[in-house]
Image: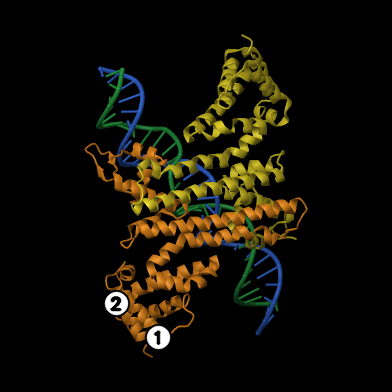
Chain colours: A orange, B yellow, C blue, D green
Amino acid sequence: MEYTVKQLAELTGVTTRTLRYYNEIGLLMPAKINSSGYRIYGEKEVDKLQQILFYRELGVDLDTIKKIINSPSFDSMKALKEHREKLLAKRRQLDSLIANVEKTIAAKEGRITMNDKEKFEAFKQKLIEENERKYGYEVREKYGDEIVDRSNQKLKNMTKEQFEQLKQLEEEVLNTLNKAFVTGDPASELAQKAADLHRQWLCYFWDHYTKEAHRGVTEMYVADERFKAYYDKKHLGAAEFLRDAVRIYTMN
Amino acid sequence: MEYTVKQLAELTGVTTRTLRYYNEIGLLMPAKINSSGYRIYGEKEVDKLQQILFYRELGVDLDTIKKIINSPSFDSMKALKEHREKLLAKRRQLDSLIANVEKTIAAKEGRITMNDKEKFEAFKQKLIEENERKYGYEVREKYGDEIVDRSNQKLKNMTKEQFEQLKQLEEEVLNTLNKAFVTGDPASELAQKAADLHRQWLCYFWDHYTKEAHRGVTEMYVADERFKAYYDKKHLGAAEFLRDAVRIYTMN
DNA sequence: ATAAACCTTTACGCAACGTCAATGTACAGA
DNA sequence: TCTGTACATTGACGTTGCGTAAAGGTTTAT
């Protein structure tokens, strides 16, 4: 079955503008362009659009959705099951909002009293869960299930601010690593700083840091395609460079 | 209890920027400004912010929220109960999304097959319900509970496109009425056109149109403060003018 | 053959803030 | 009293995910 923009739009309930925009940002490319320049979509694109709308529904931004569905290790079945989990989480959160409303109604009727803090509990809960929904998959993709599961509890207890600090640190690691890479020397001051930042970053997840584990995890980065791709994004061989830097960092 | 921006922000989980923005657009004004120009919020503002967040949560745009909570006929208890209804509706919709995901999983596992149309049913359902959430209160405010309840089923079966047609027609009625008003003659061609448009608009809600009911409803407009205010928005006496025009319109 | 209903690209507009920048204020500790 | 830091203020420009023309080419139906 083949569809033009309008046809696909009517099928899915999005606008044609949205489809063109998704084309523009490379999120959903048409199967082909016909001789008159018309966009033609096929079965595969219908399925992909469904995935996109699933994630959009969760409040995931389009850029992240793109990464998720273009990820080589993207397992649509797994994604669907995770998606279901997230929807269920959203429903639980809705339940807490409903409870909050009912409490407010009761308070207004004079049956109970609520202090200011209580009034916003459900909203804050929502903020935290939204963060998890938005970034949970991404983190899982990047760092593997085992680590995620182990550090899950730590993450769950993080505030939004802490989470943003983590994100910032993550960028700093990458930036410093890339700067150090061009020096070519894993023993250089910059490379050692990158290793140190990486240690700090790990400590967000680990309860106790050991040099051996640190070395171990960077070796894993080199071995595992997914991790390697992440660190090699800018410079090919950056994963190996980080491993070497960390080897030196953990020697003394 | 008094709060500065930061304190209120921390209490409620919004940012200080948001509070300043809400001040800027007149959605939530501080209780007072102290001698240094600091915004100071009190109990009343905390409650109002809670209302705002409730509606924001539903996807209502800030401008509409402003109208809702500033409406003289705003009954917070009633609003809360409606809000609860909407949250429950949202949960039902979530359930249908979850069912859709589960169906997709089953389809992927080869247990059943899904055609393209089915894949998007839940999303479309969502679109319709979202429209109800966004405009439901407004419509209820404007036209009273009884009419809303009677026409509820019709509305529920509307598509987004039909809904937008309705909104457009509504504007046309007002525009034509206002133009006709300045002629001063309820028998004029323009005034009769306004009456006709108003009939068309009513037919969106009514299963069977009668001249008596049409006259009746315009008389109600004059009697009921809320309706009168709506039609008198531009020209004082427009509600009466419409009633007179419809009287003539329903004579032949 | 001509209108209606599609399609294209280009480009500006919008809500609801985020994010500086430049500057003023409150208050604790040396 | 000075100073640092954590707060506050008002601009003003940036961002996301599209909406909405504008100006034109294509397909289809009558």
Query: Which of the numbered marks, if any, corresponds to residue A211?
Result: 1
Residue A217: give x, y in percent of width and height: 36, 78
The total of numbered circles placed on residues is 2
B52 versus B206 height, above or below: below
The residue sitting at 44% across, 77% down in the picture is A202
Quadrant where the N terminus of chain B lies?
bottom right
Residue A135: give x, y in percent of width and height: 45, 62
Residue D19: give x, y in percent of width and height: 45, 39
A160 versus B21 height, above or below: below
SS assignment at label 1: helix
Amino acid at the residue labelled 2: Glu
Is residue B109 in view from this perspective? yes
Is residue A16 in view from this perspective? no
Residue B70: give x, y in percent of width and height: 68, 42
User: Viewed as shown, does residue B86 lie left or right of A42?
Assistant: right
| Foreground disc of the pair 2, 1 | 1
Tag 1 or tag 2, which sits nearer the N-term?
Answer: 1
Q: Name the residue under label 2.
A: A240
Mark 2–mark 1 distance (CA, rounded to whole Å): 17 Å
The residue sitting at 62% across, 30% down in the picture is B150
Query: Which of the numbered marks, if any, corresponds to residue A171?
Result: none
Name the residue nearer the viewer: B124 or A240.
Answer: B124
Amino acid at the residue labelled 1: Lys
User: Viewed as shown, does residue A201 lie left or right of A30?
Assistant: right
The quadrant in which residue A63 appears is bottom left
Subunit of label 1: A
The residue sitting at 44% across, 70% down in the picture is A148
Subunit of label 2: A
Quadrant where the C terminus of chain B lies?
top right
